[in-house]
Structure formats: structure tokens, C-alpha cells
Image (cartoon, helix red, strand yellow):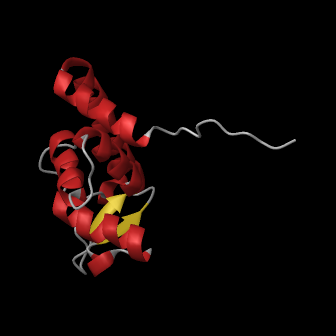
Amino acid sequence: MTCVIDYLAGFWWGKSTSNEVRLAYTGFINAYFPKGRYDPDGLYDSLRNGLLHMFTIKGKKYALTHNNPHLHLKTDTSGHIILNAANFRDDLVSAKDNYFNAVEVISDLLDKLVERYNRDGFLDLGKSEVPS
């Protein structure tokens, strides 16, 4: 899910995210996730960077669980913020829907999406030839 946020943030940002990944990632969360529920910097530093670069949760800020919706975003006795997978996924799907709904009505967002698409593509293999 952290990769999906990264991916969507790249389309939202439009221009290259080189040296600006944090700004794009946290900006997307601020713009499209439920207001005040998530710490964008914490998700970027601890969850995104930890999972993508070290395959761990950096700084142990978060604890991941599933099938425990009653624990979502609560803090345990060790100080970990609990992320229940289904709740986090649902908020991510809503953020994605909110973003694409905004793209349909805000031309600047569409321009940024097209800029990102033209530069990096979108799940595109391109033309592949297989030798016979």
C-alpha cells in the first residue's frame, strides 16, 4: 500500500519526484486521505522508507495487523500506532477515488497526470518482440 501511495503521488505531483519524493508523498496524503487521521511524515519516514529500503518498519513507529478494525490508528502500550490492513486499504482506495474524481474536474491535475504518464508510462510494456 505504501508503494501505491508513492505511485499515485507521482501522478499527482506530475513533474519528476527526484529529490522531492517526500513532498509528493506527504502532499498526496494531506490532500486525499481523511483529514487529521494519518501523520504523513510518519508514514513516509517509518512505513514507506522502512518497508521500501529496509523491509522493516523504521523506528518501529507502526504496528501492522489485520482483522482488527477496532485497533486501527490506536496507540499500543509500546507507543506503536496500529494500522489495520483493511482500514488502511479502505482509506487508500478512498484517497485514490478522491484523486481521480478531482482529476476529472481540475485541469491542472489532469495536466500533471499526463505529464507523468508521458514521461514514465503507466503499466506499459511497450512493444516487445520475441525472436522466433
Q: Position of residue 117 (x, y in %)?
A: 38, 35
Looking at this rendering, what residue extends furthest in the right direction? 132
Q: Position of residue 51 (x, y in %)?
A: 40, 69
- The quadrant the C terminus occupies is top right
Q: Is residue 85 left or right of residue 15?
A: right
Q: Is residue 95 visible?
A: yes
Which residue occupies 26% across, 26% down? Answer: 110
Q: Is residue 74 visible?
A: no
Q: Is residue 119 left or right of residue 109?
A: right
Looking at this rendering, what residue extends furthest in the top direction? 105
Quarter of the rendering containing residue 109:
top left
Looking at this rendering, what residue extends furthest in the left direction? 36
Figure check: 58 above or below 110: below
Which residue occupies 27% across, 58% down? Answer: 18
The one nearer the camera, 15 or 87, is 15
Q: Is residue 43 left or right of residue 126?
A: left
Q: Position of residue 115 (x, y in %)?
A: 30, 34
Q: Is residue 81 left or right of residue 65?
A: left
Quarter of the rendering containing residue 113:
top left
Q: Position of residue 16 (x, y in %)?
A: 27, 49
Figure check: 9 above or below 107: below
